[in-house]
Image (cartoon, helix red, strand yellow):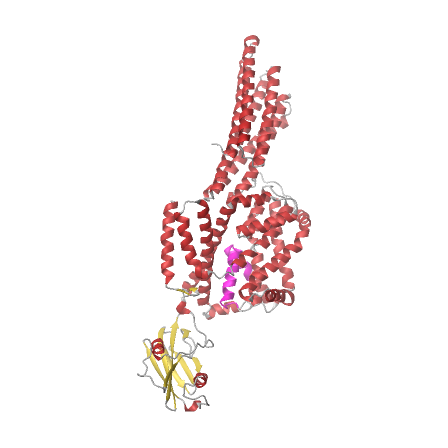
Amino acid sequence: MRKRFGSAYVVCAFLVCLLFAGNFDSRGFNLFADEVPVSPEAVPQHETAAGDEAAASGAELPGGEDDTKRIEKWIPDQKILAGAPPTVISLSDVIGHFREEGAFGENGPVDPDAVQISVVQNSKKDVVTPLVEGDRLRLVWNGTRVGETSIMLEFDYKGYQVYDGFNVEVWKPKFWMMALIVLGGLGIFIFGMKNLSEGIQRIAGPSLRRMIAMFTEHRIFAFGTGILITILLQSSMVTTLMTIGFVNSQIITLSQAIGVILGANIGTTITSWILTLNISAYSLPLIGISGLFFVFFKNERVKNIAGTLMGLGFIFFGLKLMGQGFSSLKELPEFSAFLQAFSADTFPGLLKCVFAGCVLTILIQSSAASIGIVMSLTMIGAIDDFPTAVAFILGENIGTTFTAVIASLGTSTNAKRAAAFHALFNVLGVCWVLALYRPVFIPLVELAARTLKLQLIPFGIPLAHSLFNVTNALVFLPFTKVFARLLTKVIPEGARNVAASETGLDSRRIESPPIAVLQSRLIIERMGERCRKLGEAIFSQVQGALDNEKEIQHSFREEETLDRIQDEIINFTSKILAMNPASDSAEQAREQLRIADEIESVSDYFISILKSDLKLKNDGLVMPPYMKAGFAKLAQETLVLFKDINRAYGNRVRARYFLEQVYSTCRGLTAEIKELRASFMTAIEKEHYDPILIVAVNSQLTFYRRIWEHLQNITEAYCGAK
């Protein structure tokens, strides 16, 4: 399946490159090169080659060329929406250009009234009627007809003829086509962000896991970890969801989570700076070349790098498509009127822009995509007011909290508190910026842009985004524990749901396989220690009188809990494997499946030992003292071995010598079992034990051997042995 997809991808990539090959120029590609209107103010330089101008205008010019005839290009080409009102062009300005250039054979004053003007239309479609009215040219558009034509004007002054030709196009907007192009660009952009994030995760998977391992009570470490992880993941949303998952699993505290969230809000500003890179001209070649490496190279690192570069190419290709789609939509009066309705000139208008940015981010579920849309609209001039553009970005900071709040539903109370802080942090930050928006914040951004010698468009938007998030994070950072205590009071601990998850793992919210693998690994570490404590409690009970019914029932419930934990780990790691992660993440996920199964099996044998002793008690039988002492010694040695294995797994020990040490310990324990069994068999001949007792002793000796086998299997799994 993957090979078929790869081949199909290569074919599609080449088709796309061929499709747009004709639209490349020195500035990149332009899907709508013929649809960009030329404003009347943008007057092009004149040409002196008569043949070239004649060909360009499409009109038939008088034959020959002498000193009394010139061809100029001062009137720009016209592109008009069908049904538009007449266009009026001042011919006095054109005559002034001719005079300055000496087109009439003199540089002195020219009497405009003495210039004879005539018009020739070379029309294949009757889309316009040109009328000369004194010193003005009126272009009357004929209803809703569409098409192209060319118009030639002849200016005659004292025997000198000057010709000026221009093209005219009347077009009807294909609104749905433009909207689909914008949506397609948005989809490609989001797909590119996903590819970029996943590619970086595959490359930096081990580094990500090491960063997560740095989580600590100290807020500075948590803050720095949040910045670095978000830069690598290219998504503050993923980092926040990951943090909520870790809090839900009780892997980190609420105070630590707050530090990570603060750092994530700074890390996400890197994405907006990436979007200012002007590499759209190279996006398609980047996609095509990276695709070839991704499909035809087997080396995983090469494939991961190629996938990352493909994602980068898709990001800028999507941005280009959105920009070009918006450029066409911009010509629609309805679209322009819609955008003009958003202005940050007044405080109600400012709130309206913030609300629009918030809704946009909630709808597309990507803060990076919403920033990309705003930057595209700003760069084409559809949003021509910088404070208005920044107001949209402020709204995006509120909208991005919506996903985290939704993700916290059905999670633990602490996870809800972390999501609440994320929302509170962004909302409070936007509130103080709105209070000081025009007098302080916008001038501060403009001052920073001038100081750094950056153009306000496009660099002002990421600059404002960075200034907002960095300032907020630094203000909130000293008070992480204060906010943790406040949220604990505001959101009290609720009653535990009987159907709640035992681990906090949620296979529906896996955003990053490397981090998800680490999360499940930490849960398995707890599972191992929990199983060891179960064994410790059971051995304590069987060595006593087995008269504490409450503790006995607790042991049975604990074994059932370990069963549920195993089920949740299986569901979670299976979902990770279904995401086709990098080989190291896939290997660890498979390793975790095996270890969780082995730990659960150990818990089953612990319970089997308890059941065996309970049966003896119910039948009025007593274990011989020497066998009871032998079992006590085996139990103690088993718990020590289990503890060493759990510690080694938590410390990421993958050394062969530790595996050999476990093998050696298990061989010694097996020898002890053989001695006990031999002693018991000898005693049977003399004591004539009850058959139930004989079965119980032999069964328990077998249970211990099975426990050691499973402990060996755990060690083999994480040490890399087959």
Residue 699 in the image, given as x and y percentages of width and height:
53, 20
Residue 48 in the image, given as x and y percentages of width and height:
38, 80
Residue 171 in the image, given as x and y percentages of width and height:
39, 71
Q: Is residue 266 above or below residue 70?
A: above
Kindly give the residue lying farthest to the front in the view shown. 67
Q: Is residue 524 above or below residue 684?
A: below
Q: Toward the viewer: 564 or 43?
A: 43
Picture quarter with the N terminus:
top left
Is residue 360 covered in magenta? yes
- Main SS class of the magenta portion in the image: helix
Residue 558 found in image quarter: top right
Kindly give the residue lying farthest to the top in the view shown. 686
Residue at (56, 47) in percent of width and height? 242
Residue at (68, 51) in percent of width and height? 479
Q: Is residue 33 above or below residue 168?
A: above
669 sits left or right of 162 in the view: right
Residue at (54, 59) in percent of width and height? 273
Q: Toward the viewer: 31 or 138?
A: 31
Is residue 552 visible in the rendered image? The answer is no
Residue 74 found in image quarter: bottom left
104 sits left or right of 251 in the view: left
Is residue 328 visible in the rendered image? The answer is yes
Q: How many marks?
A: 0
| Segment colored magenta | 356-383
Residue 543 in the image, given as x and y percentages of width and height:
63, 21
